[in-house]
Amino acid sequence: MKHFLAKHATIRHRLYSLYYTLFSYSRGLIILTICLWAGNIISKILPIMIPGSIIGLLILFFLLAFQLIPTCWIKNSCNLFMRYMTLLFIPAAMGIMDNYSLLLQNWIPIIFSSVGGSFIVLLLTAFLTEHCHRLPTKSSIVESEKKENRP
């Protein structure tokens, strides 16, 4: 878009830049929409309750991870969504506020489950990280060398 606003650019160059920018945004939005629709369809077919948007994100992740879609195709559209993400969460926050009385009645279990769940995730992550990154001690290295040198 900055080429479109450049003073030295010709009209032809500005139109090409505008066309390329619009094409880039629309291509990314179409890919994101197709992944969302595919996720919704798969969600309705599956017997388990997983939201279609989550399945759509997984589809998009696998398409990008296996490089079936180049990242440059959706980069502009994703940056656009990230820029205005707070506006996209306003409807969800208003939906929560519709049930304010229910939240007020159950605030103690909500707080304890949030803190307890976070604490369990913290402990599990710490345990798994320590287990995966455990470095061999000098004594274990010496013992393994002794075992290898025995006849």
Image: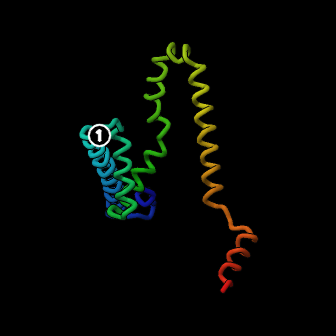
Snapshot quadrant of residue 120? top right
Q: Position of residue 51 (x, y in %)?
A: 35, 37
Snapshot quadrant of residue 115? top right
Q: Position of residue 20 (x, y in %)?
A: 33, 59
Snapshot quadrant of residue 16? bottom left
Q: Residue furthest front?
A: 151
Q: Residues within 10 Å of mark 1 (few under 14, many from 20)?
A: some
In this picture, residue 100 sits left or right of residue 115: left
Q: Nearer the viewer, residue 46 or 9?
A: 46
In this picture, residue 88 sits left or right of residue 49: right
Q: Identify which residue is drawn at 65% across, 55% down.
A: 130
Q: Nearer the viewer, residue 59 or 127?
A: 127
Q: Is residue 64 above or below residue 114?
A: below
Residue bearing the label numbered 1: 43
Q: Identify which residue is drawn at 63% across, 37% down.
A: 119
Which image quarter holds the N terminus? bottom left
State the SS at label 1.
helix
Amino acid type indicated by mark 1:
Ser
Total numbered circles:
1
Q: Position of residue 81 (x, y in %)?
A: 43, 45
Q: Is residue 96 above or below residue 16?
A: above
Q: Residue furthest bottom?
A: 151
Q: Nearer the viewer, residue 17 or 44?
A: 44
Q: Nearer the viewer, residue 67 or 126?
A: 126
Q: Is residue 99 above or below residue 57?
A: above
Q: Identify which residue is drawn at 36% across, 63% down.
A: 66
Q: Position of residue 35 (x, y in %)?
A: 31, 48
Q: Identify which residue is drawn at 68% across, 84% down.
A: 149
